[in-house]
């Protein structure tokens, strides 16, 4: 059986390719299982993750054939919501590279990423109510956090599909590039992230997503950890050394 998610590892990042182009990368049980495996890899050794789909489509939704057969017990298991939440909670940032359709479960996977880069042919939306269900894997609450309530309600309640220009306009996409530049754009963003102190990035992401009542104590504790790191000492010393010649020439 071929892999539904192809994993390409590098020292500071991992590329995850949804690999069911014959069904526009519809998210089935095998995809979910292999995404869990990829998450375990990234939790054990935290790195930036780039997610993209093969064949000119990010993910056109959940596998409708499987979805049609699911019942109450399946919904309560949170098959898709659990994996998307796990992706959201990965230690290091995730970058969704969206070419073509990102619909239904594909859109919810994109929403779970920290960043999204698209192409001119990107289309994002949640048509679930048209199939008699709701977007229950994060979109019903996460999309409003990303784009605001009015736009989110248009997408979720009225079936609006956002094109690349619209998605960029509401900051759902951070950048739009040509399809053949998509992966390179993802790597450029990954380069910027990995140029920061890795532990500082990890703790910043954790603090950012912590509930309001955890602040400011959590901020102070995370900062206390970072104040004791060698990375902080070296980076601040290098900053001061670079500034010294300018100050001495005054």
Image (cartoon, rainbow, N blue to C red):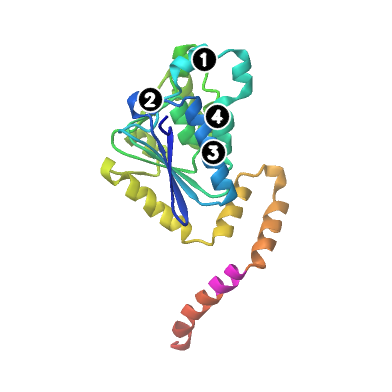
Q: Position of residue 49 (x, y in %)?
A: 47, 46
Q: Nearer the viewer, residue 178 or 156?
A: 178
Q: Which residue is mark 1?
A: 133
- Indicate which disc residue 1 carries: none
Q: Secondary structure at mark 1?
A: loop
Q: Quadrant of residue 84?
A: top right
The residue positioned 54% from the left and 47% from the top of the image is 42
Q: Position of residue 63 (x, y in %)?
A: 44, 21
Task: Report crowding for label 3: few under 14, some 14 to 19, many 20 or more residues within 10 A (C-alpha).
Answer: some
Q: Secondary structure at mark 2?
A: loop
Q: Is residue 169 above or below residue 75?
A: below
Marks 3 and 2, how far apart at CA: 31 Å
- Closer to the N terminus: mark 3 or mark 2? 3
Marks 3 and 1, how far apart at CA: 28 Å
In the image, the segment drawn in magenta is: 230-236
The residue positioned 38% from the left and 48% from the top of the image is 186
Q: Position of residue 144 (x, y in %)?
A: 52, 31
Mark 3 or 2: in front is 3
Mark 3 or 1: in front is 3
Q: Nearer the viewer, residue 192 or 5?
A: 5
Marks 2 and 4, how far apart at CA: 17 Å
Q: Which residue is mark 3?
A: 37
Q: Is residue 216 above or below residue 69?
A: below
Q: Nearer the viewer, residue 210 or 16?
A: 16
Task: Report crowding for label 1: few under 14, some 14 to 19, many 20 or more residues within 10 A (C-alpha).
Answer: few
Q: Secondary structure at mark 4?
A: loop
Mark 1 or 2: in front is 1
Q: What quarter of the picture does the C terminus occupy?
A: bottom left
Q: What quarter of the picture does the N terminus occupy?
A: top left
- Closer to the N terminus: mark 3 or mark 1? 3
Marks 1 and 2, how far apart at CA: 17 Å
């Amino acid at each position: 059986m071929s892999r539904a998610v192809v994993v390409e590892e590098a020292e500071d990042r991992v590329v995850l390719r949804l690999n069911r182009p014959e069904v526009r990368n519809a998210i089935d049980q095998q995809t979910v299982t292999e995404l869990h495996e990829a998450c375990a890899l990234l939790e054990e050794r935290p790195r930036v993750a780039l997610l993209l789909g093969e064949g000119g489509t990010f993910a056109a939704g959940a596998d409708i054939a499987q979805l049609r057969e699911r019942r109450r017990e399946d919904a309560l298991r949170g098959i898709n919501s659990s994996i998307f939440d796990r992706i959201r909670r990965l230690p290091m940032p995730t970058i969704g590279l969206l070419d073509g359709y990102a619909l239904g479960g594909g859109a919810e996977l994109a929403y779970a990423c920290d960043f999204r880069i698209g192409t001119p042919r990107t289309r994002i939306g949640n048509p679930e109510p048209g199939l008699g269900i709701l977007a229950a894997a994060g979109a019903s609450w996460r999309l409003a956090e990303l784009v605001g309530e009015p736009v989110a309600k248009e997408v979720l309640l009225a079936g609006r599909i956002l094109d690349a220009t619209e998605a960029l306009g509401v900051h759902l996409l951070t950048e739009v590039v040509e399809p053949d530049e998509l992966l390179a754009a993802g790597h450029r963003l990954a380069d910027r992230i990995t140029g920061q102190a890795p532990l500082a990035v990890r703790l910043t992401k954790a603090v950012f997503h912590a509930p309001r009542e955890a602040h400011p104590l959590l901020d102070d504790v995370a900062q206390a950890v970072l104040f004791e790191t060698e990375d902080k000492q070296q980076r601040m010393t290098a900053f001061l050394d670079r500034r010294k010649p300018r100050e001495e020439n005054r």
